[in-house]
Amino acid sequence: QARLVESGGGLVQSGGSLRLSCAASGSIFSVNAMAWYRRAPGKQRELVALITSDGSANYADSVKGRFTISRDNAKFTVYLQMDSLKPEDTAVYYCKQDINAYGLGTFEYWGQGTQVTVSS
């Protein structure tokens, strides 16, 4: 079993920056892809950024050039550096990790969500 804990959300002015973190703990053998999603009020959840086990990253068009996803494999942690934030980035952000837990196989695990609010 594993669990994810997110941190780093908050309130920031337009043009500001925030850094989200998502740490996994438990009986973890390895982690494949890690990703960040977000859900804005009245909208569907969308993929923001994804990073594979070899470090290849992909981004939603709306955040390219402003957000950077990274990972620390030794700490089972994924980060999302968000720069030049816009009011439309306001959402609850969720991390997801594809975790291979000892003896249990590989499953998706989700964080609890962290609120990011960007004021204009």
Image (tube, rainbow, N blue to C red):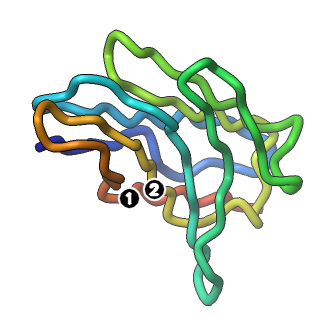
Q: Is 58 drawn above or below residue 73 in the view shown?
A: below
Give the image quarter of residue 27.
Answer: top left
Residue 113 circle label:
1
Q: How many marks?
A: 2
Question: What is the three-letter code of the residue carrying label 2?
Answer: Tyr
Q: CA distance from mark 2 to mark 1?
A: 4 Å
Quarter of the image with the C terminus is bottom right
Question: What is the three-letter code of the residue carrying label 1?
Answer: Gly
Residue shown at 32%/24% (left/top)? Answer: 30
| Residue 8 at x, y percent in the picture | 43, 39
Give the image quarter of residue 114.
Answer: bottom left
Residue shown at 62%/48% (left/top)? Answer: 12
Q: Is residue 56 rendered to the left or right of residue 27?
A: right
Q: Which residue, given by chain and number where applicable, does mark 2 sit on?
A: 94
| Residue 89 at x, y percent in the picture | 71, 60
Give the image quarter of residue 5.
Answer: top left
Q: Is residue 77 rendered to the left or right of residue 25?
A: right
Residue furthest bottom as drawn? 42
Residue shown at 41%/15% (left/top)? Answer: 73
| Residue 72 at x, y percent in the picture | 45, 15
Q: Is residue 65 rendered to the left or right of residue 91?
A: right
Q: Are marks 2 and 1 in contact (CB under 8 Å)?
A: yes
Residue shown at 23%/23% (left/top)? Answer: 29
Judged from the image, the secondary structure of the residue bearing numbered disc 1 is: loop
| Residue 75 at x, y percent in the picture | 32, 16
**Label 1 neighbour load within 10 Å: few <14, some 14-19, many 20+:** many
User: Which of pointers 2 and 1 lies earlier in the amino acid sequence?
Assistant: 2
Judged from the image, the secondary structure of the residue bearing numbered disc 2 is: strand
Q: Is 31 drawn above or below residue 119 in the view shown?
A: above
Residue furthest top as drawn? 74
